[in-house]
Image (cartoon, helix red, strand yellow):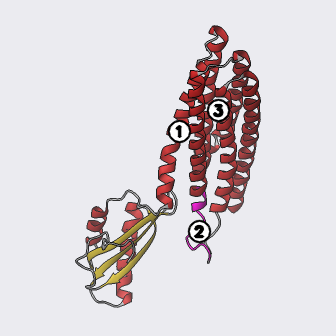
Amino acid sequence: MIEKDHDHEELAGNKFFWVTVLNVVITIAEFIGGALSGSLSLISDGFHNAGDSVSIVFSYAASRISKRRQNGRNTFGYKRAEIIAAFLNSIALALICVFLIIEALKRITKPQPINGNLMLTIAVIGLAANLLSAYLLNSGSKSSLNMKATYLHILSDALSSLAIIFGGILIDLYNWTMADPIVTVIVAVYIFYESIPIIRQTFRILMQGAPNLDYDQIKKDLLQIDGVFSVHHVHAWSIDENNVIFSAHVNMHDMKISEAQPIYSEISKVLKDKYHMCHVTIQAETTRGEHEDIIYDRGNDIP
């Protein structure tokens, strides 16, 4: 089994490598082609592909780091590495989009001559490379969320190339140079729009934001367990987008630890099976805090 996982990891690594190479080639071609043709949309897509290349390398490295086992320095492990990578990549991409939109608006007011034929040729090469990248990642995207995210990102690159091809055709046939900054704005707005939800989600996780849980229902479910008569002081947070940590104080009758252990096990089972918590910490109490709310609120974050 370990050997099979190692082979899968090596295969994924090879695919990530070739997709990165293709993205670097596209990026260089679009920067050069954009400079020679005067096409801002090609340069904007070049920035997009450059961001993708960094993102793919960064994501793969973060994925490898996240698989490290927890230790004395990181008792919850290294899963946050991927969240940090996604957050930084998305911030950088959003800032680039803002810059490109500003530049495109300047060009709308002051149109510049563009070589539509060269712009079209480079965009077709970019589309072909993106489709090849998507083909390389297609099989892995069915078994790995990380590869699936990269696969979907590559498909969005292909969409950008299609938009630039359309703009190149309009310029080549009708000399409508205004199509270039318009396509730039459309592509940049689309990429910015796609980046915002990732920024919000990763920022929420990094800020220890609570996952979307029905705390009242959790309390009802725990009170159904024989031996539990109150639940309070609940904290929940995410290590990454898939792993939720949960802690709570529960009021129980005075009993031996050996008698409380089966109740602990039942609480953990409910929280893990129904709410998919990956780590549960329970503090048992008799009467202390039994009338407090489920979420602690005394004017400070952590008592």
Residue 139, compared with residue 261, is above or below; it is: above
Residue 63, compared with residue 293, is above or below; it is: above
Residue 133 as seen in the image, left or right of residue 210 = right
- Which numbered circle lies on residue 144? none
Residue 28 as seen in the image, left or right of residue 89 = right
Q: State the predominant SS element of the stretch in magenta.
A: loop
Estimate the x, y position of residue 76 in percent, counting from the top left: 55, 70
Crowding at label 1, few (<14), some or many (≥20) Cα neighbours within 10 Å? some
Asked if the stretch drawn in magenta spans residue 80, the answer is yes
Magenta stretch in the rendered image: 73-82
Gap in angstroms between the C-alphas marked 2 and 1:
31 Å
Q: Secondary structure at mark 2?
A: loop
Q: Nearer the viewer, residue 39 or 110?
A: 110
Residue indicated by mark 3: 44
Residue indicated by mark 1: 192
Q: Which residue occupies 67% across, 52% down?
A: 58
Estimate the x, y position of residue 79 in percent, counting from the top left: 58, 62
Query: Which quadrant would residue 285 be assigned to in this image?
Result: bottom left
Q: Do we see residue 144 in this rendering?
A: no
Q: What's the residue type where badge 1 is placed?
A: Phe
Residue at the top extreme, as displayed: 174
Q: Nearer the viewer, mark 2 or mark 1?
A: 1
Q: Nearer the viewer, residue 144 or 86?
A: 86
Q: Nearer the viewer, mark 3 or mark 2?
A: 3
Q: What's the residue type where badge 2 is placed?
A: Gly
Query: Which quadrant would residue 108 be assigned to in this image?
Result: top right
Residue indicated by mark 2: 77
Q: Secondary structure at mark 1?
A: helix
Q: What's the residue type where badge 3 is placed?
A: Ser
